[in-house]
Amino acid sequence: MAVPETNPRPIVVVTGGGQHVWAMVNAIADRVGPVIVILEVPESKKRLLLGRARRQGWLQAIGQFGTMVLSRLGKRLYASHAARLIAQEKLDTEPRPGQEIIHVASANGPECLAAIQRIQPGIVLLNGCRLLSKDMLARMPCPVLNYHAGITPKYRGMNGGYWALASGDSANFGTTVHLVDAGVDTGGVLKQAYGQPKPGDTISSYALRQTAFSRDICVEAVSDALAGKLTTFDPGLPSKQWYHPTIWYYLWTGFRTGIW
């Protein structure tokens, strides 16, 4: 794909950060044009735990929190595996010199809205940030897309790749770019990509693996949005929202099936 000399309107990515996010940002910058990143402060673990407890009960919330802690520990223990994955897939996982980054407290906050309204982008791509409120979405000056690390609508929510594998549905280990509405990954599907984990991959590295085989669909979706030719399709799948697995489910499934 040829890189255009200029984009009529800028590209904005709203995110909480992470290696997989920067790999996607850099791929879009290389193949479509410069990206302005709005980087939010991730939601505190305490607030996240309280929110999960209100929605699902304390037992589930504590179990999910345990897996989140274990996953973070896994990123440290298996850093060498991640490094090999990054090298093999040629992922550029750090902000580049000169990258424009706007720091905000929340993707739903007034400073984020003010930045987007000032920039007047041609496309806003969400990647690993808070859900946008109905009011926030109503004020967007352009299409808002989301990159989701799962096949929607079957694996909406968290850890879509993991849940596909743990459910014996490895054919749906994939990703989706979709329009954003007020639901959780319920917007119209634009692009989907499918792949497979490789030996050594775990819940700590699935996001990087998925990004590696999903750069094309993000580039295509952003290019389509800038050209004003977004088209949705129906994957014909059932719809379900998933959360982090509880620590006891994660360990039981791992020892039983080898899916970590």
Image: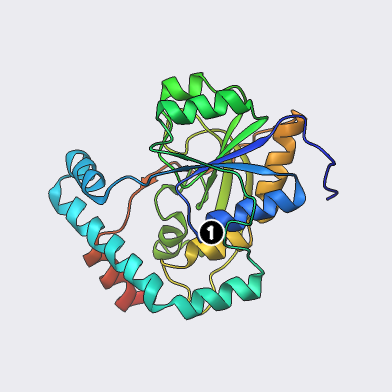
Q: Residue at (50%, 60%) from the top-left corner?
A: 207
**Residue 95 spot, x, y in % from top left:** 58, 56
Amino acid type at mark 1: His
Relative depth, front residue between 144 and 182 = 144
Residue in front for this viewpoint, 150 or 52: 52
- Residue at label 1? 20
Foreground pick, 67 / 235: 67
Identify the residue shown where x is 63% and y is 65%. 91
Name the quadrant of the C terminus. bottom left
Q: How many numbered discs, if any?
A: 1
Q: Secondary structure at mark 1?
A: helix
Q: Residue 83: image x %, image y %?
A: 54, 76
Q: Residue shown at 37%/47% (left/top)?
A: 42
Q: Compared to 175, does 92 lie above or below?
A: below
**Residue 122 percent location from the top left of the image:** 68, 30
Left or right, 187 with reference to 194: left
Q: Is residue 252 left or right of residue 130?
A: left
Taking the view exactly as shown, the residue that stands out farthest to the front is: 98
**Residue 33 placement, left or right of 146:** right
Residue farthest along the left direction in this orientation: 58
- Residue 259 seen in render: no
Q: Is residue 120 visible?
A: yes
260 relative position to 142: left or right: left
Q: Which picture quadrant has residue 4?
A: top right
Q: Quadrant of residue 64?
A: bottom left
210 relative to 4, above or below: below
Indicate the quadrant where residue 209 lies.
bottom right
Q: Position of residue 153 (x, y in %)?
A: 49, 42
Observer-nearest residue: 103 or 73? 103
Q: Residues within 10 Å of mark 1 (few under 14, many from 20)?
A: many
